[in-house]
Amino acid sequence: MAPSFGMFSRSNHKSPAERTVTLIGKPGCHLCDNAQAVIETVCAETGASWEKKDITQDADLHHKYWEQIPVILVDGAQHDFWRVDPKRLRTALGA
């Protein structure tokens, strides 16, 4: 097996199925509902997994993202907020 050399390693390139999309929102938020619909569709098409976090249940998320919800993360890094563009999300997932 060849050694891995950090940024030069091909293992850094994940397939969509190895990626996770996180939706940070709150109950009763219509923009969050719209974002979830886009995320569900794109993840179903690409094989990526997704999760939902309630900003009202996490003080750290509340402090960091309250004025931006819904916030969308890809593999823990902020991808977008307020609205989700399906084409842009597919591209971020490598699809």
Image (cartoon, helix red, strand yellow):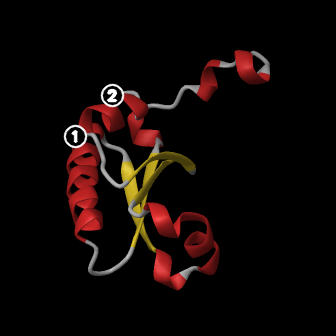
Q: List x then y, in percent, for residue 11.
A: 62, 26
Residue on which disc 1 sits = 45
Which amino acid type corresponds to the residue marked 2 in the rendered image? Ala
Which amino acid type corresponds to the residue marked 1 in the rendered image? Glu
Outermost residue toward the front in this view: 67
Question: In the rendered image, is residue 75 in sight?
Answer: no
Q: In which quarter of the image is the C terminus?
A: top left
Q: Residue at x 51, y 31 (%)?
A: 14
Seen in the image, is 94 located left or right of residue 78? left
Residue count near mark 1 (Cα–Cα under 10 Å), binned few <14, some 14–19, many ≥20 = few
Mark 1 lies on a secondary structure that is helix
Q: Which residue is drawn at 53% across and 48% down?
A: 78
Q: List x then y, in percent, for residue 86.
A: 25, 39
Q: Which residue is drawn at 62% across and 19% down?
A: 10
**Which of the 4 quarters of the picture holds residue 34?**
bottom left
Q: List x then y, in percent, for residue 22.
A: 44, 57
Q: Which residue is drawn at 27% across and 60% down?
A: 36
Q: List x then y, in percent, for residue 31.
A: 26, 63
Going from N to C along the chain, the mark reached first, 2 or 1, is 1
Along the line of sight, the residue nearer the viewer: 37 or 45: 37
Seen in the image, is 94 located left or right of residue 32? right
Residue on which disc 2 sits = 95
Along the line of sight, the residue nearer the viewer: 18 or 39: 39
- Image mark for residue 62: none
Seen in the image, is 47 located left or right of residue 24? left
Mark 2 lies on a secondary structure that is loop
Q: Looking at the image, do the residues carrying marks 2 and 1 touch, with CB atoms under 8 Å apart?
A: yes
Outermost residue toward the bottom in this view: 57
The answer to whether 61 is drawn above or below residue 1 in the figure is below
